[in-house]
Image: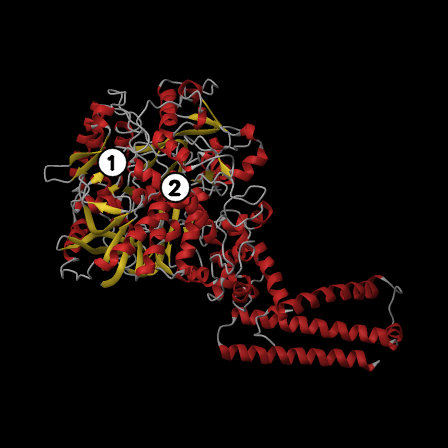
């Protein structure tokens, strides 16, 4: 691969941003505007029985975390000058991302 | 501090940078400039650069030559004009190949518009930013060729040893330190001297420093009495409105709503040469036919339509709004004549070599090009679009002359005390006690020059101005500076510039006083006609302890005998 | 036209490390007439109140780009800004932000110029040129029209937060210059030049803050140019 110029990251960020926007529309209308007046535990369980919805949420989760992780990392790159602070920030971001991903994974896969 | 180069160029406008591109081929080369290169005043040229390309109708160099000679009121040296116009088309093509983004015809060629005094459409342009794009392109070429720049270095004097110019001494504005630049060839491209006048289109930097430096070193200055007033400067600031506006078809209207140019130049109307048009406007104003009797007339663009104005004159539209509060699409612009260009300057031969005297002896290692030089291709009145051309053509020629001469010029050494005299002078200026204000003297000088040595001159006015300059010189000796520090001392710079102004305004006035005729931009109310029998000559003013003295040299006439000049 | 606008207070940033390592603000009262620009006022202050006040200026017609400064919080050219256009009676003038200070309103623009020089700002031709002009159709010329009008005043780069924190970032002015050549139909140096701007400190450092567009006194759009360059750079990577 050629020298990393930031172009791929920039492109993926736009791509993931666009996808997240589409997924978020689906998610919002489903969770807040469609379906029964009162959403019950059983409704959620029923939906997650469908492997398509499971994949939907897994993709959603992955995209959001990647987008967010990379975005924060870019901000650190812009405004943090010291290398050691950068490494510290990277560790923190990775831990946070990994933690959030695990919680999400557990939630989705449990059903 | 000591620097050594083969060629040192003073001034980073069009002429200086074009010369550098040539001189660089023959050895090391640097450019000293008191403003950053792209801040040079070449960039303020708007309308165009002339060449008989024939992209907009038949044209050839002989027609361009005749227009230029006639425009000059027959004072231009015709062999030089021939060089200028014959090399013009090639020069434009070369500039285009360097990347100049000219405006284009529908079929992709360089577009050409009409201009004052040119009987054909021969002004190549880039909207109304022609000088700007040329200046930036040449700066970019200099970057490409790795020309060394010393920006914000103010050159103060020549280094002279064994009767030859060996370099220059310059003040680094940032630190206040002096630097000696030793060189085998020194090229002056320091621009014009419009700052001598109150109402001018020129930049604050255009104080004629280069002329003053050479004059102080004992060299003559040629045709200083010829100062061009551009017909259309904004009222009241004097900032330039391009002749391209009239080239596109704008009208000039007086207070009675009349296109009065029909009384002054019935054939060419608004597109008469600048001296004719400026005199016409001034006459209307003087005779009470300004707008509401005021000191301005109107430039009307409205009939051109918004599309054409926005496409061809975008800068004028913006500047009119900002400097006069007028929306040029809806209202006429208030304008007045404004001091614009100095036809005179450092006398050179046709290759930019500086002349030592009116007899034509050449100084070794010293060159000049651009507005500061007088070849003379503009004679008594320059045509619009010929100045950018002059800067590039003779910039190139000066650079090539350096190339040709370098092998024969020995590498000299600086006299060890080269900086001492300058250092002493600066100390004197900095430490002087007194009660005079630099700004007040400058203002009085500019106001006086405007009034007494402006578009119309007369014996009594000129004598009054000569006396005034004497008084101002006395006051100059009592200027006390507020800023006595070394770091970026712009007040000291202004004082040095004022000294230059006082030097050469005296030459303008004296030259004008002696020339008892009216020719081109020099118009004497007490001698209203041209006198070829006596005054078909160039003046060479030189310094003597008793004050400036003028010598005269004949005009070189090759193709066109002087005739009555009518438009 | 000589109507007076009354008395204005100018609050001007002052700094001269040779005398005092700390900066301060000086205030000057100036009688302003109709038609006076900020530069006219500065000249008046320098000429009659305080000769030590230092600032750059030259053409006074908004083409040389010397007198860019921060006026009432916005970068602009002092020479083309009418006092009457500003609100309030107090005008605060600071040097352009983001560049090292030299003295008063004068800043060190060395880095800015180096960035301009870094994008190969000249027309590259490999194939031989004809005896006549290279043809360029008006539509092609129009594409670079606003980019060639840049006067290198430095207002845009000075307004960019990315440049404040990363002076290595080429900045909007240099990228606009790159655009001017990459999109010039006559240029043949596109790939080399794209390789320069396709960099972490090139176009990808731009976060589309849009400060540059807002700061430009000539109403140019460096941000649009950068967007165009990003697309070109991306095409190059994929």
Q: Is residue C63 visible?
A: no
Q: Earlier in the sequence, mark 1 or mark 2?
A: 2
Disc 1 chain ID: B
The alpha-carbon separation of the residues under discs 1 and 2 comes to 26 Å
Q: Is residue B145 visible?
A: yes
Residue B262 or A109: which is nearer the viewer? B262
Above or below, comparing residue B203 to residue B329 in the picture: below
- Horizontal and vertical percent for residue B77? 29, 36
Quarter of the rendering containing residue B345: top left
**Residue lying at 32% horizontally and 36% vertically, measured from the top left:** B378
The residue pinned by badge 1 equals B224
Above or below, comparing residue A29 to residue A103 in the picture: above
The residue pinned by badge 2 equals B86
| Total numbered circles | 2
Q: For the C terminus of chain B, which image quadrant?
A: top left
**Residue lying at 60% horizontally and 47% vertically, measured from the top left:** C139
Residue C16 or B166: which is nearer the viewer? B166
- Horizontal and vertical percent for residue B186? 25, 53
Residue A41 or C137: which is nearer the viewer? C137
For mark 1, give the secondary structure: loop
The mark closer to the camera, 1 or 2, is: 2
- Horizontal and vertical percent for residue B332? 50, 28
Local crowd size for mark 1, using a 10 Å CA cut-off: few (<14), some (14–19), many (≥20): many
Q: For the N terminus of chain B, which image quadrant?
A: bottom left
Whether residues under marks 1 and 2 lie with C-beta atoms below 8 angstroms apart, the answer is no
Query: For this view, does C226 lie left or right of residue B116?
Result: right
For mark 2, give the secondary structure: helix
């Amino acid at each position: 691969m050629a020298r990393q110029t930031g172009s791929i990251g920039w492109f993926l960020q736009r791509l993931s941003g666009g996808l997240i926007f589409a997924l978020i529309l689906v998610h919002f209308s489903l969770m807040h505007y469609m379906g029964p007046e009162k959403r019950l535990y059983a409704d959620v369980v029923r939906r997650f029985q469908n492997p398509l919805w499971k994949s939907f949420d897994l993709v959603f989760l992955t995209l959001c975390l990647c987008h967010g992780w990379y975005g924060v990392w870019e901000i650190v790159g812009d405004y943090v000058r010291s290398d050691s602070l950068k490494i510290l920030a990277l560790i923190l971001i990775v831990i946070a991302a990994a933690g959030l991903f695990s919680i999400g994974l557990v939630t989705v896969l449990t059903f | 501090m000591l620097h050594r180069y083969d060629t040192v160029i003073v001034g980073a406008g069009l002429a200086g940078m074009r010369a550098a591109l040539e001189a660089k081929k023959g050895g090391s080369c640097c450019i000293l400039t008191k403003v950053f290169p792209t801040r040079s005043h070449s960039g303020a040229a708007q309308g165009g650069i002339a060449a008989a390309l024939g992209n907009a109708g038949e044209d050839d160099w002989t027609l361009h030559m005749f227009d230029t000679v006639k425009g000059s009121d027959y004072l231009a040296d015709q062999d030089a004009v021939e060089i200028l116009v014959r090399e013009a088309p090639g020069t434009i093509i070369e500039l285009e190949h360097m990347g100049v983004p000219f405006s284009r015809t529908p079929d992709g060629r360089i577009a050409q518009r009409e201009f004052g005094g040119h009987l054909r459409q021969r002004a190549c342009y880039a909207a109304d930013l022609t000088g700007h794009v040329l200046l930036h392109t040449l700066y970019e070429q200099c970057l490409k060729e790795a020309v060394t720049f010393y920006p914000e270095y103010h050159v103060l004097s020549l280094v002279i040893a064994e009767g030859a110019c060996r370099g220059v001494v310059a003040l680094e504005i940032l630190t206040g330190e002096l630097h000696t630049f030793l060189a085998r060839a020194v090229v002056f491209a320091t621009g014009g001297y419009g700052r001598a006048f109150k109402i001018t289109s020129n930049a604050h930097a255009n104080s004629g420093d280069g002329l003053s430096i050479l004059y102080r070193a004992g060299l003559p200055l040629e045709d200083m009495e010829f100062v061009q007033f551009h017909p259309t400067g904004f009222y009241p600031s004097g900032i330039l409105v391009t002749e391209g506006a009239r080239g596109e078809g704008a009208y000039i209207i007086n207070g009675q709503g009349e296109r009065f140019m029909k009384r002054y130049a019935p054939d060419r109307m608004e597109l008469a040469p600048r001296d004719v048009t400026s005199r016409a406007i001034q006459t209307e104003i003087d005779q009470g036919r300004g707008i509401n009797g005021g000191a301005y007339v109107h430039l009307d663009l409205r009939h051109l339509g918004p599309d054409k104005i926005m496409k061809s004159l975008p800068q004028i539209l913006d500047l009119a709004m900002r400097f006069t509060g007028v929306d040029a699409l809806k209202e006429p612009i208030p304008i007045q004549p404004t001091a614009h260009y100095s036809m005179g300057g450092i006398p050179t031969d046709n290759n930019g070599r500086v002349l030592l005297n009116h007899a034509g002896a050449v100084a070794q290692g010293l060159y000049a090009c651009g507005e500061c030089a007088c070849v003379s291709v503009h004679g008594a009145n320059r045509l619009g679009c010929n100045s950018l051309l002059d800067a590039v053509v003779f910039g190139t020629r000066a650079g090539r002359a350096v190339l040709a001469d370098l092998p024969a010029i020995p590498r000299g050494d600086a006299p060890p005390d080269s900086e001492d005299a300058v250092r002493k002078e600066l100390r004197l200026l900095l430490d002087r006690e007194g009660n005079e204000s630099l700004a007040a003297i400058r203002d009085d000088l500019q106001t006086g020059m405007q009034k007494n040595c402006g578009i119309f001159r007369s014996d009594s006015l000129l004598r009054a101005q000569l006396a005034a300059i004497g008084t101002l010189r006395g006051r100059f000796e009592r200027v006390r500076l507020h800023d006595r520090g070394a770091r970026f001392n712009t007040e000291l710079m202004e004082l040095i510039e004022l000294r230059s102004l006082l030097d050469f305004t005296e030459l303008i006035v004296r030259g004008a006083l002696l020339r008892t005729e009216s020719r081109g931009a020099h118009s004497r109310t007490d001698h209203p006609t041209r006198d070829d029998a006596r005054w078909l000559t160039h003046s060479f003013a030189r310094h003597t302890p008793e004050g400036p003295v003028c010598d005269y040299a004949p005009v070189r006439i090759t193709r066109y005998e002087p005739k009555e000049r009518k438009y | 036209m000589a109507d007076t606008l009354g008395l204005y207070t100018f609050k001007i940033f002052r700094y001269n490390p040779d005398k005092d390592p700390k900066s301060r603000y000086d205030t000057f009262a100036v009688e302003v007439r109709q038609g006076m620009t900020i530069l006219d006022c500065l000249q008046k202050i320098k000429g009659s109140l305080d000769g030590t006040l230092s600032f750059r200026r030259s053409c006074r017609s908004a083409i040389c780009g010397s007198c860019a400064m921060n006026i009432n919080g916005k970068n602009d050219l002092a020479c083309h800004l009418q006092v009457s256009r500003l609100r309030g009676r107090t005008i605060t003038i600071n040097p352009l932000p983001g560049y090292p200070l030299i003295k008063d309103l004068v800043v060190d623009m060395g880095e800015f110029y180096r960035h301009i020089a870094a994008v190969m700002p000249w027309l590259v031709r490999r194939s031989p040129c004809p005896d006549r002009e290279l043809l360029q159709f008006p539509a092609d010329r129009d594409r670079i029209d606003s980019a060639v009008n840049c006067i290198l005043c430095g207002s845009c780069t000075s307004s960019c937060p990315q440049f404040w924190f990363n002076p290595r970032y080429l900045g909007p002015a240099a990228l606009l210059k790159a655009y001017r050549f990459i999109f010039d139909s006559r240029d043949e140096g596109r790939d080399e030049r794209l390789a320069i701007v396709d960099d972490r400190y090139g176009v990808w450092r731009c976060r589309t803050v849009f400060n540059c567009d807002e700061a430009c006194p000539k109403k140019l759009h460096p941000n649009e140019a950068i967007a165009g360059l990003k697309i070109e750079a991306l095409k190059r990577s994929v």
